[in-house]
Image (spheres, rainbow, N blue to C red):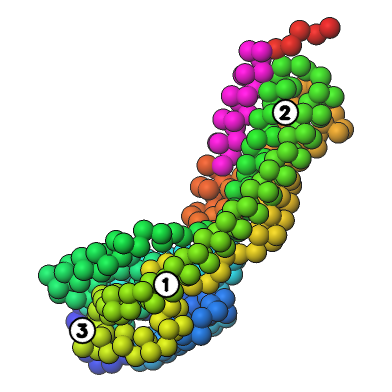
């Protein structure tokens, strides 16, 4: 024991506890992963202001990495090759295709987890704990910045940075002003619709062939019913997506027109609305009033800001033709899968193969859905597989119940 104490006191490079090395390495890897995710999101963010905020956050994570490396060097801890730290292929794919809003929500949760797990519990080494506490404060700032970015898209969910009493009064006043504007509505993108369309086509046609196969036992009937169902599903989904996007575009245009009229008919109330939005973000009342006054001198700028705050966005809806093609093609692909075995096989063997192929396809579609929902790919896949099994099983039972006598 005396020898160990001598080593600890005579060597400034030895850590105070064996927990220091793993904690620093874990934090180091997390900072690299975070900066990589932020860099991927920056490439997809079209708003220059938001992209700059995210870029600075990525640079900040890089700064954390360098500070952690400096401390590891002081303690004699070997620093691994940075190129060995990579995002999992699935996480990298999610960062490239998932909705940016959901990615930001995921990053906010990750920042909170980092604060709770990596930077709060003491290591026993005073200098390391001081470093981790400093990084923790900056991570808390990151979480706040992410919340601000999300609130710019969903302002009604904002968490005010004001004292409780003043915040409630400000929110109440703003709600009263917005109360006469009941026409605010939101929309959704077509990417998720395409994924769900593939699932709908797959599940619906799998159910059709299961029911018809059980009821008739005739492959030619199953093939006819399956193909008819596939075509009907694809066309129905395509026209539905087209009409939905077109309706959303009309709603967005109408909302902007109404907001413009609100500015023209009630300029003072609209200025107060704008001021209250800024106050809810933490801006002093005098500064918020001044900002609203400045914007009111440029009606188009005021319209864009109010539309972003009240409607979530002033951008037009998606392309109806693009949405129709995406929904129709994805639904058609999903719908044709259960039918394919009946081109080459007959009777019960064809139904068994169709069931196996369909359930595998359900799992794949469920896993792909996690690219949008950011859930675990395997749990999403299993959930979709179970849903497909239930649909097929129920319709097969219905087919047996109404079995057609052979002629």
Q: Nearer the viewer, residue 213 or 274?
A: 274
Structural crowding at the residue carrying mark 2, measured as other residues with C-alpha within 10 Å and reported as few (<14), some (14–19) or many (≥20): many
Magenta-drawn stretch contains 395: yes
Q: Is residue 84 visible?
A: no
Q: Nearer the viewer, residue 86 or 8?
A: 86
In this view, which residue lies farthest toward the left? 165
In this view, which residue lies farthest toward the front? 265
Residue depth check, mark 3 versus mark 2: number of the one nearer the observer: 3
Q: Earlier in the sequence, mark 3 or mark 2?
A: 2
C-alpha span from label 3 to label 2: 65 Å
Residue 4: x %, y % from top left: 24, 81
Q: In the image, is 129 to the left or to the right of 228?
A: left
Label 2: state its secondary structure. helix
Residue 345: x %, y % from top left: 85, 29
Residue depth check, mark 1 versus mark 3: number of the one nearer the observer: 1
- Overall secondary structure of the magenta stretch? helix
Q: In the image, is 159 to the left or to the right of 343?
A: left
Q: Residue at x 43, y 78 (%)?
A: 303
Residue 159: x %, y % from top left: 27, 69
Q: Residue at x 70, y 40 (%)?
A: 233
Q: Earlier in the sequence, mark 1 or mark 3?
A: 1
The residue pinned by badge 3 equals 285
Structural crowding at the residue carrying mark 1, measured as other residues with C-alpha within 10 Å and reported as few (<14), some (14–19) or many (≥20): few
**Residue 209's disc number:** 2
Quadrant in which residue 220 is drawn: top right
Q: Earlier in the sequence, mark 1 or mark 2?
A: 2
Q: In the image, is 123 to the left or to the right of 59?
A: left
Quadrant in which residue 88 is drawn: bottom right
Task: Give the magenta part as a residue range.
Answer: 384-402
Q: Residue at x 66, y 60 (%)?
A: 320
The residue pinned by badge 1 equals 261
């Amino acid at each position: 024991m005396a020898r160990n104490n001598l080593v600890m006191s005579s060597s400034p490079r030895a850590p105070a506890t064996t927990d220091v090395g793993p904690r620093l390495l874990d934090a180091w890897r997390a900072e690299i992963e975070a900066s990589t995710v932020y860099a991927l999101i920056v490439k997809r963010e079209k708003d220059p202001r938001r992209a700059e905020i995210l870029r600075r956050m990525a640079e900040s994570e890089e700064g954390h990495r360098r500070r952690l490396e400096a401390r590891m060097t002081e303690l004699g801890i070997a620093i691994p090759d940075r190129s060995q730290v990579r995002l999992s292929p699935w996480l990298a794919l999610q960062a490239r295709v998932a909705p940016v809003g959901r990615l930001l929500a995921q990053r906010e949760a990750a920042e909170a987890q980092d604060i709770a797990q990596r930077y709060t519990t003491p290591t026993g080494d005073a200098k390391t704990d001081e470093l981790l506490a400093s990084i923790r404060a900056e991570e808390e700032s990151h979480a706040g910045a992410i919340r601000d970015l999300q609130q710019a898209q969903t302002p009604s969910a904002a968490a005010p940075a004001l004292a409780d009493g003043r915040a409630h009064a400000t929110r109440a006043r703003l709600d009263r002003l917005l109360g006469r504007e009941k026409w605010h509505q939101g929309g959704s993108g077509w990417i998720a619709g395409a994924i769900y369309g593939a699932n709908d086509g797959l599940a619906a046609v799998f159910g059709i062939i299961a029911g018809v196969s059980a009821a008739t036992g005739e492959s030619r009937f199953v093939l006819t019913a399956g193909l008819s169902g596939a075509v009907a599903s694809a066309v129905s989904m395509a026209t539905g997506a087209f009409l939905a996007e077109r309706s959303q575009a009309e709603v967005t245009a109408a909302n902007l027109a109404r907001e413009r009229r609100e500015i023209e008919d009630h300029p003072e109330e609209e200025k107060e609305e704008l001021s209250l939005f800024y106050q809810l973000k933490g801006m002093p009342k005098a500064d918020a009033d001044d900002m609203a006054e400045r914007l009111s001198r440029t009606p188009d700028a005021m319209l864009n800001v109010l539309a972003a705050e009240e409607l979530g966005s002033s951008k037009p809806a998606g392309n109806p033709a693009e949405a129709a093609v995406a929904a129709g093609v994805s639904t058609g692909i999903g719908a044709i899968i259960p039918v394919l075995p009946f081109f080459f096989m007959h009777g019960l063997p064809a139904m068994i193969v169709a069931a196996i192929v369909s359930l595998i396809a359900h799992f794949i579609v469920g896993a792909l859905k996690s690219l949008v929902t950011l859930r675990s790919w395997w749990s999403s896949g299993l959930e979709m597989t179970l849903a497909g099994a239930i649909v097929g099983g129920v319709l097969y039972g219905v087919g047996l119940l109404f079995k057609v006598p052979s002629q």
